Image: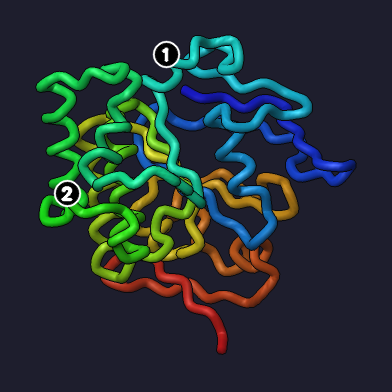
Amino acid sequence: MIELKQIELSYDNALILEQINISLRPQGVTSIIGPNGAGKSSLLSIASRLLKPNNGEVLLDGHDIHQMDSQLVATRLAILRQENHITARLTVNELVCFGRYPYHRGRPTDHDWQQVEQALCHLDLIPLRDRYLDELSGGQRQRAFIAMVFAQDTQYLMLDEPLNNLDMKHSSGLMKQLRRAADELNKSVILVLHDINFAACYSDEIIAMRDGKVLYQLSSTQLMDNQKLANIYDMPLTVEQLHGKPVCLYHL
């Protein structure tokens, strides 16, 4: 389990996160939603040790994450940031193999390459494996980075807006794959999403944020409520049922 206790974050006296107290489950899919500037990416960065809060602590399996060995943390959690810049000219295959670095330390074994192959298959990247990243479309490149995170094979997968640049087919395919990873491999998937309907359809739990605070941490069924969504987004929203699933509609 990952626990965030009394978390506060500020930049130049501007409060970004205030009094965050949440637990991230060790298995299942958790979506973090909210309007722009709510603090979603900052929360994910703190949970993954990319950022250190001004106050509070983050516990990974009961241990202070900032006191843990970096290599050990890298075998427990993997994160995909919203923006990824790599200056080296790498093929898709080479990039995905970087996800195995906490294990092979520069000398990949047969097992590492099997994990790479599996990640490439999951993200429909086998035909592109020998292409260079700068030869790919934005969506293809996004899938390559997600495959790298999959190859890391950690208990916790943290993804910041993973649907960026993906078309409907690959967005739906990725969410199904993440759901499968949680159900069949007992992984914990934590992701920042702007699409409420994807969050509602595939998540066990939704963390809703606004103005640097957590407003709700509820099951997707509990959160999909007209008043709660209006509180989050400050606009009228309507929840309807479609094939037994809650769907959010906004007013044009």
Pointer 1 local density, CA inside 10 Å: few below 14, some 14–19, many at least 20:
few
| Image-based side of 180 in relation to 194, left or right | left
What's the CA distance linking mark 1 and mark 2? 28 Å
Tell me: residue 217, above or below residue 240.
above
Label number found at residue 129: 2
> Nearer the viewer's eye, disc 1 or disc 2?
2
* Percent of width and height locating residue 212: 73, 47
- Which disc number belongs to residue 72? 1
Q: Secondary structure at mark 2?
A: loop
| Residue pictured at 68% horizontal, 54% vertical | 38
Q: Residue at x 46, y 22 (%)?
A: 1
Locate residue 116, reporting x and y percent.
Answer: 18, 35
Q: Nearer the viewer, residue 45 or 84?
A: 84
- Residue 142 location (% of width, % of height): 35, 55
106 vs 135: above or below: above
- Relative to 128, does residue 185 appear above or below in the rendering? above
| Residue sitting farthest toward the bottom | 252
Regarding residue 171, the answer to whether it shows in the image is no
Instruction: Give the residue furthest to the right.
Output: 13
Who's the residue at 33% across and 63% down the image?
139
Name the residue nearer the viewer: 175 or 207. Answer: 175
> Looking at the image, is 111 positioned above or below residue 191?
above
Task: Kindly tell me whether residue 85 is visible in this rendering.
Answer: yes
Under mark 1, the amino acid is Leu
- Residue 130: image x %, image y %? 16, 49
Figure disc tally:
2
Residue depicted at 58% across the width and 31% down the height: 50
Identify the element where label 1 is drawn. helix
Q: Which is more toward the observer, 165 or 208? A: 165
